[in-house]
Image: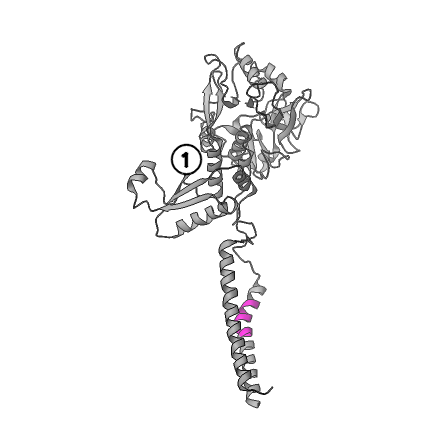
Amino acid sequence: MQVTTHSRRLLRWQNLAFILLLLLVTGLLGWLSTRYVYQADWTASGRNSLSAASIELLGRLPGEVAVTAYAREAPPLVRKHVAELIGRYQRHKPDITLAFINPDLEPQKVRELNITTDGELLIQYEGRSEQLRDVTENGLTNALQRLARGGARRLAILTGHGERSSLSSQSFDISAWARQLETKGLTAAEINLASDTGIPADVTALVIASPQVDLLPGEAAPILDFIRRGGNLLWLTDPDHGVHGLEPLARELGVRFDDGVVVDPNVSQVGQMLFGTDDPRVALVASYPAHEITRNFELNTLFPLAGGVRAEGDGAWRAEPLLQTLSNTWLESGAVTGKITYDEGADQSGPVTIGLALSRPLPSGQEDAPEDGRLQRVVVMADGDFLSNGFLGLGGNQQLALNIANWLSSDDVLLDIPARTAPDLSLQLSRTGTAVIGFGSLLLLPAILFGSGLFIWLRRRRR
């Protein structure tokens, strides 16, 4: 091609047009990036994304959520962590607002709110507010759930018959569980049917925690009335102690408690090393049937002095086994002392069901019955010790107890907010792999680069 003045001028115009088009496309892409956002989480565990439970909860929050973070400007890591967490929620609910306040510049406000932690959040929704120190997805989702309730849910704990108390810190009692319920927006208050006039209508669930003496003749009637009105129930019993005047309740629910204590040889063999006890009367539950309470629940739970329970109703309730022991366990009919062996014909072979979950559509015709298809829910346990202060911290007992309370209060969304781990933070290499990478990066790669450069230099010299 012959180079002329016209061709040079044409080439300059082509270069200028290319530059102008490049700038125009770059500006257009920049403008589009301000209007549309696309993000993808490529981490192995999806740790930069919200769980399905959190997303479902956000879909049930119609109003605006205002989040104020009391965090200092330096170091910036706290503010960065808060912004990243809130950003995950904003992807699914854009009307979540986030504002930062330096607590050093607002001392009066900090004193009024009792802000004690750098990065503490104040969450406001529909005129209600809550402070949050646990700045994680689990903590924030639970806080939003409590705000969405519009008020605390009440659990009434039966008292007056030697039941486990929500106020006492003794090993037998359940005050630790009651304190945990407070963090979920559930309040636990004791009720004595001998002095109180029935069970209040605003009670979400009644808790009968292992009575030691029989109820008075007139005390069973309010409980039955509560169940027939659609109330939820957690009923804990201890083996060989009877139901203490609650036979009408057992017939209403269609359940029967078996005689005997669960013996678990698995705990007696390896329990001291794994669980801190080798008592065969402590039953281990390691796997769970499909149920909302135990959905994605993979923790071992331990049940001291447990019995057996089974459903024998007429089908009015849907009864589902919730907790079952391992197959080589049994219900011991004799004394659980000395060397314990399974007696064919006398003992009941395992697996033993120690917990039942019952549900049915809410009774129709009740003035306060909702019309959204919700279910009436009951959990019956042939063991009360797992909930006690002395055993609540064993294995997954505490998480299971919270799951039961959430299910009884119809807050299933709180049951499945898994902790996100990062399995891809470390790279495990064999000795051979380490040697290959080291040899390649230190010797082979520099040699290839040097050789290619030398080849290009020699080739150009020959021209």
Dot 1 falls on a residue whose secondary structure is strand
Q: Please tell me whether residue 438 belongs to the stretch shown in magenta.
A: yes
Q: Quadrant of residue 455?
A: bottom right
Query: Residue 176's quadrant in the figure?
Result: top left
Q: What residue is disc 1 on?
A: 129
Q: Could you tell me residue 360's position as x and y percent?
A: 63, 24
Which residue corresponds to the image point at 52% horizontal and 27% vertical from the top-left? 385
Horizontal arrangement in the rendering, residue 341 relative to residue 128 (left or right): right
Residue 264: percent from the left, percent from the top? 61, 31
As for residue 346 lying within the magenta part, the answer is no
Whether residue 392 is visible, yes or no, is yes
Q: Amino acid at mark 1?
A: Ser
- Magenta-tinted stretch: 436-445
Q: Is residue 216 above or below residue 94?
A: above
Q: How is the image coloured?
A: one colour
Whether residue 442 appears in this view of the structure is: no
**11 is higher (above) or lower (below) than 251:** below
How crowded pointer 1 is (Cα within 10 Å; few <14, some 14-19, many 20+) is rated as: some
Residue 197 image position (x, y, % from top left)? 48, 13
Q: Residue at x 51, y 17 (%)?
A: 212
Q: Give x and y (percent) for residue 290.
A: 64, 35
Location of the C terminus by quadrant is bottom right
Q: Residue furthest top?
A: 217
Residue ranking furthest to the right: 345
Q: Residue furthest front?
A: 6
Residue 447 figure quarter: bottom right
